[in-house]
Amino acid sequence: MPEFSDVAVPVPLDMVFTYRVPAGANPVVGGRVLVPFRQKRMMGIVVELHDRAPSVATKNIVSALDAAPVLDEQLLRLGRWIADYYLAPLGEVFRTMLPLSAEFKRSIGYRLTEEGQMALHLAGMSGSSRRSQRSPEEQAGEFRVLDYLAGREVDDNSLVPEPTLRSATGVSKSVLGGMVRKKWIVREDVSASREAARMTKIAVLKFAEGKLNDNQRMLIDALAASGGKVPVETLQSLTVPRTTLGTLVRRGLIEIVVEPAEFTVSRTKPRQSPFEFDFNAAQQAALARLCDGVAARKFAGMLLHGVTGSGKTAVYLAAMRAVLEAGRSAILLVPEIGLTPAVAADLHQIFGDEVAILHSALSDRERAEQWHRIKRGEARMVVGTRSAVFAPVSDLALIIVDEEHDASYKQEETPRYHARDVAVMRAKMANAVVVLGSATPSLESYFNAKKSKYGLVELPDRVEQRPLPEVEIVDMRQEFQETGQEQVISRKLAAEIKQRLDRKEQVMVLLNRRGYSPVVLCRTCGKKLECRNCAIALTHHKREHKMVCHYCGYMAPVPKACVHCGSEYVYFLGTGSEKLEELLHGMFPQARIARLDRDTVRSHEDFERTLNALSEGELDLLVGTQMIAKGHDIHGVTLVGVVGADVALGLPDFRAAERTFQLLTQVAGRAGRGESLGKVILQTYFQDHYAVQYAARHDFIGFYEKELRFRSWMHYPPYSALANVLVRSDKLDEALAWSGKLGKWFESTRHEGVRVLGPAAAPITRLKRDYRYHFVLKSPSREKLNTTLRAMLAYAAQQRIPRTQVIVDVDALWLM
Ligand SMILES: [Zn+2]
Ligand SMILES: [Zn+2]
């Protein structure tokens, strides 16, 4: 065994750490090890084993947790690529790739020192008259801790776990910290892998004879019926007293053994009658392209551009089934909101037990179970949100990214990876096919298809030749002039809704802003009511009777007077989805109305329930935010009203037009998916904007060509690589000083081929208590951009700017 091991530890530092391998430990490259790091134990990944002695002293590995790699060679390479491309610490990347935190138990313990015993002794003698800056309560707490530890120590020299100590003495963490600094007590991290949780108690039948009462007989019979060996947990679900098992164990009829838990694998259900796909010619051609690509066993990227309602999902599933039948593996990535129980049911019907579904509602333990099933090769079809791109499948043949333009694929914390781009890289490494599907592809993907980097597969028509809905634009400035007041629902939209309701058809109305009123303004001093932690206006939520910050969750009471000047003239301005629902109730009292937004939807079940009600015809009208725009197939909806989906056009963000075009197209796509023709009423204050105009004409190509010209002029992606560098601190002075330093450095170093804009206050100047300044870097050369960013991080480290306060967001989706 080599003497040293380089380990990637999940800390915000761009390096790996060398540890000595103690005798008996057998770490493997790609396996997990427990290592001491500063005062803690952490779980890291072994990246190299070697005999090169480092120049500094090394600590020993505590233990090696895996006999075989948890990250195979390909995933290790993928992790290194992510760390490099997104400038993220390698250990943090690996932590994101492995959903195994449930197998690691964090545990801190304390022990009394000789100094501590002395202090306790002195206190007992003198009545403690020593000078102290601590409050009497703190001192009392400290002596309770000393007392407790001294009492425990008589017969037991082991550490007292932190939760035990704190609940016994009632002291805070900071008191314990102070005692550690005075060396009265020692704090040790004794975290370990959760072996115990992976073991399970099994009851084994030894003898089935003897005199037995009814309960005992029932238990023995149950055990015999299941082959004489069953987890104790299962027996406990029988209606016999718990003591019965104990009695039988004492009599030697049953033995209890502890064995490694087989992760709960559901019994193989026979697949139901083969799922039949009924494909039109375009779908068949698309499927053939995908399958040919897979059969070639070479990397290929494909952009599947299909209009809303063209049957993309069926093509994905059929291609995955072909992969499964060939004995290989596939991954389907879906946006957060797309993974409903109905979708899961379909997947189970098509793939039986060979599918693993990874969604955000899983507990850490369930996530780990699914991971092991995939790793063992029991589930070769993986469906999940963003992080499913790291699923440990072998012989990967196909990765599909559904709704590839969706922003939920970008992780907005370290590592700030984009799952679509990681999927492309993983497919390259595996010689697999990657399919990016959408009705509204991102500019980047469309550009790549145009340059023939990806093959373009098109589904130009809706299934069964259903036409795309007619879109009518209502100019809200004109509506204001003609009616003399600001309208939420135009006369045109109101009339169309009434007509649909009279015909017993269904309507969706989109307003992409939740709450009741988004702004509270004082007419006397002109100030808004802002969040205490963010430079963001608080939104009035009427039903909860609260003012809420949509960025940090801060809540405040609803003001009766201005908090700035005391004036009573406070006005609640604007309309959110809650108010829109109320307005519609007022206009159409007979209609059955429901609302879908983050306030009414707490879980996938809520979401599913409302959509089911709509689908079953139990609702006439559905109001909501962009949640209602995504991928639902409800046949009764013949009218979609859009009330202010163009809010984003007013934001200082170069992607505003693209986002608006995508949202308008997606929501319009909800209309007319059944027998009856669909119609869309698009209310806007920006009626001349090209995003609105092209969306109304369903002219994708027109929009992309125009938007690409704009991006090209402005040197924005896809013509430039872009990174947002955010400097933040809860102290304004620090944020200013650090961003100033970096600004001077950028100026003096002048990296050729890289444009640096800033430092400037970020559009949201304060967020979650942090003051924020940022730089935007653009370069036609990704290599030059990354070299500059790397040098900047090195300089920041040298200037002692904490790594966590300088955020580098490569390919940033938001510059806010
Ligand atoms: Zn005021
Ligand atoms: Zn806030």
Image (spheres, rainbow, N blue to C red):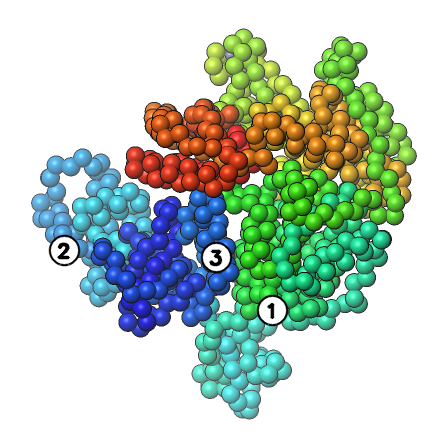
Whether 332 is drawn above or below 778: the answer is below
| Amino acid type indicated by mark 3 | Arg
Residue contact between numbered discs 1 and 3, judged by CB atoms under 8 Å: no
Residue furthest front in the image: 752
The residue identified by callout 2 is 114
Whether 477 is drawn above or below 111: the answer is above
Locate the N terminus and report the quarter of the image it occupies: bottom left
- Residue 766 in sight from this viewpoint: no
Residue contact between numbered discs 2 and 1, judged by CB atoms under 8 Å: no
Q: Residue at x 62, y 23 (%)?
A: 650
The quarter of the picture where residue 208 lies is: bottom right
| Amino acid type indicated by mark 2 | Glu
| Amino acid type indicated by mark 1 | Glu
Q: Is mark 3 within 8 Å of ligand 2?
A: no
Residue furthest top in the image: 524
Which structural element holds mark 3? helix
The residue identified by callout 3 is 77
Q: Label 2 vs label 1: CA separation?
A: 55 Å
The residue identified by callout 1 is 378
Q: Label 1 vs label 3: CA separation?
A: 24 Å
Where is residue 46 drawn, in percent x and y? 39, 61
Which structural element holds mark 1? loop
Q: Residues within 10 Å of mark 2 (few under 14, many from 20)?
A: few
Where is residue 712 drawn, in percent x and y? 61, 30
Please tell me whether mark 1 or mark 3 is closer to you in this view. Answer: 3
Which structural element holds mark 2? helix
Q: Residue at x 80, y 31 (%)?
A: 697
Where is residue 78 drawn, in percent x and y? 50, 55
User: Sequence-wise, which precedes: disc 2 or disc 1?
Assistant: 2
Q: Is mark 1 within 8 Å of ligand 2?
A: no
Q: Residue at x 18, y 35 (%)?
A: 133
